[in-house]
């Protein structure tokens, strides 16, 4: 009989969250054994580390992609949206745009109301802790950025010296990135920075695909996974931490018998815990695009960052203090840029949209991608918000401050119907979250200690536990959750 493989902890997924969880647990107690298990491997493509190549990496490195797609989206002309998710050591940190945005104070104070212990004052120390380790590089302005800032000022926005540390995110600012510059610009991921494999008590098992969590009654006892075509098992003494991301974490829970019992019954999966909200509340922001061709007498600026180093935060409701627009900026010289080389773009992300969606099983076969329906623009008011955000991009791009760069507005064509343009072109920002929602109410999937309700020995720590959407790209908050979540585990050991 082969000996069972036992670990104190098993962390599923070596992405933005899982790499931090495994490393912090390992550093806390060198006597503890940790298995960090990841479906992807080590990329052999050095391009992934070069920030300015990220668009190209996203399009041309299918080997690190899960290849998820949405179901056709009726409100986006029935388009199927490509939903990028990385399958690699480092997770989405290795193909994301690296921009670092904490979110607003009010986002987390609202979290604190539905998930006590997660309000701004509770989470701030964990953002600061992450920033001690992950480098945060502030972009540098050049002539184009200065002119863009002039245009934003002419539009009526204030300059914000630092959207992460100021009282409000409102205004135009230099973008911040998880990039090191020693001596060249290199992407940072939590895997490359926290380096879980440096700890002797961590076993990193890559190219190992977790198919199910095993239970004795409602107690998690181990995992089933496939490596090199062989089905294998690993067991725990303490806990399993699921950090597979906002699409795969609910999928793994459902395959393991945790989810809506009616859904599980369709696939003959025995119920461990009836938690109807597993895979519900999928939240994703969308972005719209305002494009301008660049005058023939100007050189197109080139940046060593993933995007132009500027961002504009604003709101769709003038009377509101809630920021719900984060406009990034692109130029055609970014490698792999999907448009004219001689062009610049404002890309307002629209946040706090009301529409949410679902992740459901397609079958009980773990190899099948889940059915993902982000439900874009299904709630009243969301289209209106997108139109206002697009109008902001158009108006700033047309300000006199940018006149020496702007030849003409190319998208949407001047006078075009904005609603039809949005339905034709709006796209995902890849900010999926909320599918294993944290809360104190009995319908939430995890409690405020990130334990899966109705089970023991199982927590979820990743972007799926966001109780509500935030005014930011999702990596910073995911890293914060990983830091705080691991502290919660460690405090339970004292
Ligand atoms: C293209 C793109 C651009 C983005 N740009 C930004 C940005 O600029 N700034 C920002 O803040 N956010 C950005 N985001 C979002 C951000 O990167 C994610 O929210 C964050 O990385 C999520 O972290 P996570 O730990 O939840 O999941 P991930 O980082 O996705 O980690 C999950 C890991 O689990 C592994 N896994 C999944 N299923 C299994 C299984 N069955 N068995 C074993 N392993 C498994 C995956 O392979 C993956 O490595 C972007 C996302 C994408 C996709």
Image: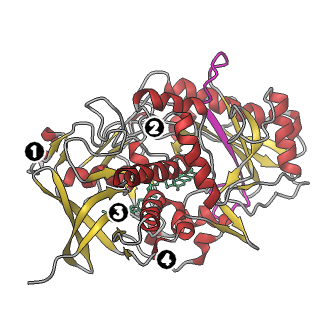
- Vertical relation: 361 (above or below) 304: above
Q: Main secondary structure of the magenta part?
A: loop
User: What residue is at 25 percent from the left and 60 percent from the top?
Assistant: 368
Figure coloring:
secondary structure
Can see residue 416? no
Residue identified by numbered label 4: 198
For the point 37% across and 48% down, the residue is: 70
Q: CA distance from mark 2 to mark 4?
A: 46 Å
Where residue 231 is drawn, which disc sits there?
none
The crowd level at tag 3 (other Cα within 10 Å; few <14, some 14-19, many 20+) is: many
Residue 208 in percent (x, y) is at 31, 73
Mark 1: secondary structure: helix
Gap between marks 1 and 2 measured at Cα: 32 Å
Nearest the eye: 343 or 438: 438
Q: Is mark 3 within 8 Å of ligand 1?
A: no
Give the magenta range: 317-339
Mark toward the start of the polypeptide (3 vs 2): 3
The earlier-in-sequence mark between 1 and 2 is 2
Residue receiving disc 1: 265
Q: Mark 2 vs ligand 1: CB under 8 Å? A: no
Task: Give residue 11's mark.
Answer: 3
User: Badge 2 is on which residue?
Assistant: 76
Q: Nearer the viewer, mark 3 or mark 1?
A: 3
Q: Is residue 337 magenta?
A: yes
In 3D space, how far apart are the residues under numbered discs 4 and 1 (Cα atoms)?
43 Å
Please tell me whether residue 110 is drawn above or below residue 366 in the rendered image: above
């Amino acid at each position: 009989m082969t000996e069972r493989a036992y670990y104190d902890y098993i962390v599923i997924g070596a992405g933005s969250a899982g790499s931090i969880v495994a490393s912090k647990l390992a550093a806390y107690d060198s006597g503890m054994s940790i298995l960090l298990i990841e479906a992807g491997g080590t990329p052999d493509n050095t391009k992934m580390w070069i920030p300015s190549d990220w668009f190209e990496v996203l399009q041309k490195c299918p080997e690190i992609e899960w290849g998820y797609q949405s179901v056709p989206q009726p409100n986006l002309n029935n388009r199927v949206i490509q939903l990028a998710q990385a399958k690699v050591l480092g997770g989405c940190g290795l193909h994301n745009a690296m921009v670092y945005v904490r979110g607003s104070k009010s986002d987390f104070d609202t979290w604190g109301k539905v998930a006590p212990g997660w309000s701004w004052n509770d989470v701030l120390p964990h953002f600061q802790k992450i920033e001690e380790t992950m480098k945060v590089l502030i972009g540098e302005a050049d002539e184009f950025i200065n002119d863009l800032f002039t245009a934003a000022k002419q539009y009526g926005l204030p300059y914000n010296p630092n959207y992460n540390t100021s009282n409000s995110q409102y205004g135009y600012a230099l973008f911040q990135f998880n990039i090191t510059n020693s001596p060249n610009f290199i992407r940072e991921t939590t895997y490359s920075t926290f380096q879980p494999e440096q700890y002797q008590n961590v076993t990193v098992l890559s190219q190992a695909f977790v198919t199910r969590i095993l239970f004795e009654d409602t107690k998690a006892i181990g995992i089933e996974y496939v490596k090199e075509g062989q089905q294998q098992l690993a067991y725990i003494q303490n806990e399993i931490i699921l950090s597979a991301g906002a699409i795969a974490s609910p999928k793994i829970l459902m395959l393991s018998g945790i989810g809506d019992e009616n859904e599980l019954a369709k696939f003959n999966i025995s119920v461990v815990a009836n938690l109807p909200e597993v895979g519900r509340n999928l939240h994703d922001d969308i972005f719209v695009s305002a494009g301008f061709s660049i005058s023939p007498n100007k050189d197109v600026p080139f940046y060593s960052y993933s995007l132009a180093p500027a961002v504009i935060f604003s709101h769709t409701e003038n009377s509101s203090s809630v920021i719900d627009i984060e406009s990034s900026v692109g130029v055609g010289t970014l490698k792999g840029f999907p448009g004219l080389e001689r062009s610049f773009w404002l890309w307002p992300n629209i946040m706090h949209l009301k529409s949410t969606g679902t992740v459901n099983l397609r079958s009980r076969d773990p190899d099948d991608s889940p059915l993902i329906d982000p439900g874009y623009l299904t709630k009243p008011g969301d289209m209106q918000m997108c139109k206002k955000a697009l109008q902001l991009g158009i108006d700033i791009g047309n300000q006199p401050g940018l006149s020496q760069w702007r030849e003409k507005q190319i998208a949407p064509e001047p006078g075009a119907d904005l609603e039809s343009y949005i339905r034709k072109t709006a796209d995902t920002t890849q900010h999926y979250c909320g599918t294993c929602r944290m809360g104190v109410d009995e319908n939430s999937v995890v409690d405020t200690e990130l334990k899966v309700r109705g089970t023991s020995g199982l927590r979820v720590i990743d972007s799926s536990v966001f109780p509500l959407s935030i005014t930011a790209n999702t990596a910073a908050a995911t890293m914060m959750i990983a830091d705080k979540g691991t502290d919660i585990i460690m405090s339970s050991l004292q």
